[in-house]
Image: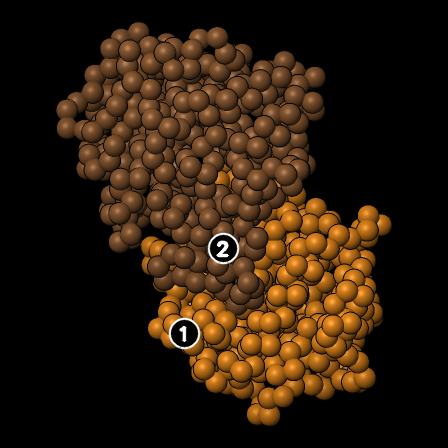
Chain colours: A brown, B orange
Amino acid sequence: MSQLNIMDSEVDIVVGALHSDLTSFMNEWKPIFSQYHLIIVKDPELKEDLIIPDGFDLDVYTQQDIDRIVGASNSIKFSGYSCRYFGYLMSRKKYIISIDDDCVPAKDDKGLLVEFVAQHISNLSTPATPFFFNTLYDPFRKGADFVRGYPFSLRSGVACSLSCGLWLNLADYDAPTQALKPSLRNTRYVDAVLTIPAGAMLPVSGINIAFDREVVGPALCPALRLAGEGKFRWETMEDIWCGLCVKVTCDHLKLGVKSGLPYVWRNERGSAVESLKKEWEGVKLMEEVVPFFQTLRLPEAAVTAEACFLEIAKAVKEKLGRSNQMFARAADAMVEWVEIWKNAGSGPLPVDN
Amino acid sequence: MSQLNIMDSEVDIVVGALHSDLTSFMNEWKPIFSQYHLIIVKDPELKEDLIIPDGFDLDVYTQQDIDRIVGASNSIKFSGYSCRYFGYLMSRKKYIISIDDDCVPAKDDKGLLVEFVAQHISNLSTPATPFFFNTLYDPFRKGADFVRGYPFSLRSGVACSLSCGLWLNLADYDAPTQALKPSLRNTRYVDAVLTIPAGAMLPVSGINIAFDREVVGPALCPALRLAGEGKFRWETMEDIWCGLCVKVTCDHLKLGVKSGLPYVWRNERGSAVESLKKEWEGVKLMEEVVPFFQTLRLPEAAVTAEACFLEIAKAVKEKLGRSNQMFARAADAMVEWVEIWKNAGSGPLPVDN
């Protein structure tokens, strides 16, 4: 991965801080984080001051910055896990890597520390192959190639825009699954990266992702907010919704989405049983949401992520918005996000007053 | 995998013998093969008598059996790798596992012998999930489950009809890739099984597969024969073609196709450079074949594998057959195969005269 050195300056690591004391989180990540610029966004609902150890190159954003730059009168809420999206807006780098603050670096199946950033950037900077499945997984990985029968015309692949990493220990299960199987832990290190085929949908977890901000940044926003959204991952749907929007956008624009490596080690917290009553709302929504995205086709005139995202918003409003106000609000948020992105997501960063 | 004991009697292992001396092959597999019924089909072009060690429960079929049961006057040739398909016809079991005679049992990443049959049967007897991708791979595997965001209505999955295993050491690359990278070996053991999403096509390699004969058996036949087909895998396309037919059939019938475990260890033989002039023919064909299968939609009235296969044959004849006689011949072979399957692939086995 020798190309990574020139790319280090093109990476922002974004952390949404839902906990005030980031000391152990940051120190665990220090070998990796200390090489990159960090953007930390404090959950506006978090009362205590952030505690961040020295030795990092970082910018911290709080409610004040959100109010100043986005304003208060809009349909987008940056509280809870959604605070990270304000960091996406403040980045000016090509690549963003986003990581939840309950994760620490993982070790691979040989006991070595996972090359977290290098793997995400490798996923994003080598081609994706969404138009034919390669049975040996990522053909651009060292030691691999395209197998017999893979059409040569498809072997150059397409640009990859989203890299979805995975989780060891506590996986990203929903509250019902956690409640039914409280001792379930993910111990299987699967040494693979694969392109999700065009047309196939997947549940993108925001716990550990990276994306090409320049290309799909405008399509990542906290649009779908559950009425009972909480401070545990299994009480949120904003990332799943966002992932479906990005996948449809990538399929339409002939861009790739990869899943697999790198893993993070995820520590447990929260009571799944307590969360169950909130979670069912999200679970029920998916029954409507998935068929909608699976059958959604965007007009050919949409040739940018912004345009695709606006088309998706339009369809959400028309087809889902009537049955449930939550979808109508999501559509409004998406339209507003594109406007915010235009004003605050590019050009020079707004300075403090 | 406790359900396997009752399923052992439902499995036939089919081997196409392209080499006369099967002694070392059979002995390497003895710990596994000795528990199952084997069908060995001798390549009609192989002159020498087969040498098969004692201690196995098996039936051997030769050119004589093929002539007697299928007859000589037809468009299907059972020579070379295609001889195994005669074994599929002679089986009366629910599941068929098919393995090339240049493979031996592999060891997993912990050094343990791969549970070859058990893994294939587990893949086939647990549901597949083609309508939404699960990022933690097979949700029915021990220690895994569906991740957050996976629609509950899709969690029961669908029946799995085809299980595609992989290869360590010499992977199933084509001749150009082998010739360009002669030292390329697959050393990566990826501990995963995944469902190939509906609508996505893949290159199915016949080296190591298992399938539900009762459901998709009629859709596996040696239809596409290259003019210069040879005795090395990279000189054949019959399995790739067959795999595309089965995938389209499974997508249409809402059945699953899985890929991943189990691995086999594949020994090398043959000169890729020598094969290059033959291989380019297959390579060129894929450029036409893949878009055809990607856009093929079958009529709703086709509700069995036979019916789907005949519809595919019709479309091949109409859309591909005009540009290339090889495709027209493939279509004829497919139609004839369904007839042969009806007569010889079910009911009591024809006895020797």
Q: Which of marks 2 and 1 is in front?
A: 2
Number of disc labels: 2
Please name the amino acid that badge 1 sits on: Leu
Q: Mark 1 lies on which chain?
A: B
Query: In the rendering, at what x and y percent does residue A4 appear?
Result: 28, 48
Front-lying residue, A305 or A150: A305
Name, please, the residue furthest toward the left: A54
Question: Label 2: which residue?
Answer: A157
Q: Residue B147: in sight, yes or no?
A: no
Front-lying residue, A235 or A93: A93
Image quadrant occupied by the C terminus of chain B: bottom right
CB contact under 8 Å: marks 2 and 1: no
Occupied quadrant, residue A10: top left
Q: Compared with residue B96, is residue B124 higher up or lower down, i.e. above or below?
A: above
Q: Is mark 1 on a helix, strand or loop?
A: helix
Q: Residue A285: in sight, yes or no?
A: yes
Q: Is mark 2 on a helix, strand or loop?
A: loop
Question: Label 1: which residue?
Answer: B180
Please name the amino acid that badge 2 sits on: Gly
Query: Residue sitting at 52 percent across and 19 percent down?
Result: A336
Left/right placement of residue B169 relative to residue B101 reads left
The CA span between labels 2 and 1 is: 19 Å
Q: Which mark is residue B163?
A: none
Q: Are marks 2 and 1 on the same chain?
A: no
Front-lying residue, A210 or A342: A342
Q: Compared with residue A138, is residue A258 higher up or lower down, i.e. above or below?
A: above
